[in-house]
Structure formats: C-alpha cells, structure tokens
Amino acid sequence: MIFLFAVIGLILCSVHSYPTQGLFEKTDEYPGKTPEEGGFGASTLIEKANVNVGKNLSEPLVMFGDIAVPTGFQNADPCTAQGCLWRKASDGKVYIPFRISNQFSQRERAIIIQGLNSFAQSTCIRFTPCNGQRDFIDIQSLSGCYSYVGRRGSGQVVSLNRQGCVYHSVIQHELLHALGFDHEQTRSDRDQHVRILLENVIRGMEYNFRKIETINLGTPYDYNSVMHYGRFDFSWNGQPTIIPIPDPNVAIGTATQMSPTDILRVNRLYRCRSGASRRDRQPVQLNHFL
C-alpha cells in the first residue's frame, strides 16, 4: 500500500511539470523583482490579474480576493490550530514539495524559483522539487492569482497566471496563503488600525473585507505586510476602500516583498529555530532530492 501511494505521488508530481535543475541559483538576470511591477503592491497586481477568476467552473471557488475555498468553509488562519500546517522534519525544517507547470517560460520559472527560495533566506521553510510525495504545491497558470490557505492535501493549486501574477511580491503573497496566512486587513484587531469604507467597495465584493478571528502570534498590525490590501482595492468609484487610523497618510498595500513582521510570523507559526548558518540558507540543488 505504501509503495502504491509512492507510485501515485510520483506520477502526480511528474505530470505537466518542468525540470527545475539549474534554476536554483540566484542570478543577476532574475533577481526576483521585476520592473513590470511598476511600483504596485502585491494586492493591486492580484486584483488586476484576477478579472477572469470565477469564469472557469473547472477551477476552485475563489473568494476574499485570491483565496481558493474548499467545499464547505472552513494572520494565521484559524485552520492552523486545527491541523493545516505543513509538517516539520526532524532537522527542524519544513520541507514543502512543489511542482511547476510547463506552461511557464524559462524566465517565468526563474522568477517563481526565486520566490520559493526567498523563504529559505530567513525562515525554516524549504520548498523542494516534488519527488513522489503525496502532498505538494502545484504551481499552474490558471485564470488569476490565488491559493488555498494552509496545507489541504494532495496536489493543491497555487495559480500564478502568466499575464499578471509572476512577480516576486505576488509569489510570496500566494505562498504565504499556502503556509496558512490570511490578508493583513482581515486580522481580528484590524478595526484599531484601519477603517473599511464599504460604501466605496464594488457591490458584491464586500466579503473581501470581512474580519477573521485570526491567530496573531503576538505580532503588531503591519501596514507594510505583503499581505495587506491597497488603499483603493475593489473600489468602484476611485475612492479609498481602506484608510489607516489614526494616521490616514500611512502607506498600505505597496510592499514588494515580505516585511520583517511577515517573516517573524512565519518563524513563530512554524516554530523555526533562529541562527541558521549561511550554508543552510543556500538554495537547495535538485540532486539533493533525487
């Protein structure tokens, strides 16, 4: 039976995937942050890219902007207290298998790999090429940018549409969802830090601003989080949908990479040990897993 699961997992990991050897080393040509971002934060890029999300009935139901919702609803999402974390290995690291679809170009794959590797620089998360594991991240170019929250089992899709999602900030944003994190402005204490202006929100999109009883891990509200919506996201009239308080001029939704607080939360949620060596932070080579 174990052998059968291994064979099935290997087949799932292999279908529509692309060899990742040679893409794990950081290069000057693919630094992970691209000029095409144009100064936009992750949430604005995601909103622009997700105009067609929901039109393909074969894809998951996507709500709250870019969160794929499993059948039946269920900062760390409350699910992290109920078993949707990725498992930690005996060496203290969290190895998360991934597969990248062959839909992506060489350049796009390199940017995605840089986003995956960025977690190894400051956390115990290690995204590793899928090699027969049952549960893995299945990175595809579907109708927009979206991910499930936390580990859901089997090959769970992280969609990075080639026409608007293959940016460093968006990749980190969607992977943080897959690790178990919700949007910053849905935090349980958000009303002390931002004011939501539902009158300016596109009708029918109000659910994107719902509040969750999140597990905040003893960290402060972070306007600089790569998980924070922008000031005008989902606006129908060009007026703000989110205003920071007490200072309305604070920048929000402009992060182009994980903030120090984003990183701290990953380390706290997964109880990462600090003080990793320089060698330990190096991108992992494919032949380490074969």
Image (spheres, rainbow, N blue to C red):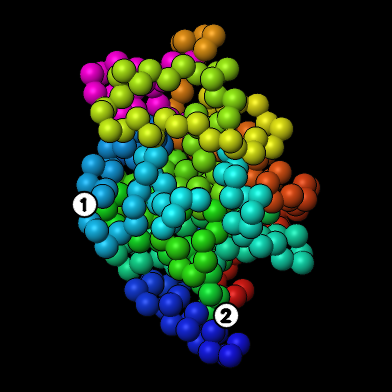
Q: Residue at x 53, y 35 (%)?
A: 212
Do the residues bearing badges 1 and 2 touch, measured as CB atoms within 8 Å? no
Residue 189 or residue 140, whichever sits in front: 189
Q: Residue at x 65, y 26 (%)?
A: 220
Q: Magenta includes 239?
A: yes
User: Circle 1 — which element?
Assistant: loop
Residue 55's mark? 1
Q: Residues within 10 Å of mark 2 (few under 14, many from 20)?
A: few
Q: Residue at x 72, y 66 (%)?
A: 89
Question: Does residue 205 appear in this view?
Answer: yes
Q: Position of residue 218 (x, y in %)?
A: 71, 32
Residue 160's mark? none
Residue 17 is drawn in which quadrant? bottom left
Disc 2 marks a residue whose amino acid type is Leu
Q: Residues within 10 Å of mark 1 (few under 14, many from 20)?
A: few
Q: Magenta includes 155?
A: no
Q: Residue at x 22, y 47 (%)?
A: 52
Disc 1 marks a residue whose amino acid type is Lys
Quarter of the image that includes the N terminus: bottom right
Task: Please state which of the two labelled residues, at mark 1 or mark 2, is closer to the viewer.
Answer: 1
- Tell me where the magenta segment starts and ends, as one range: 227-244
Question: Does residue 163 appear in this view?
Answer: no
Taking the image as shown, residue 200 lies to the left or right of residue 188, namely: left
Taking the image as shown, residue 218 lies to the left or right of residue 109, namely: right
Q: Which residue is mark 2?
A: 290
User: Circle 2 — which element?
Assistant: loop
Q: Position of residue 290 (x, y in %)?
A: 57, 80
Which secondary structure type mostly characterizes the magenta part of the structure? loop
In the displayed structure, 26 sits above or below 251; it is below
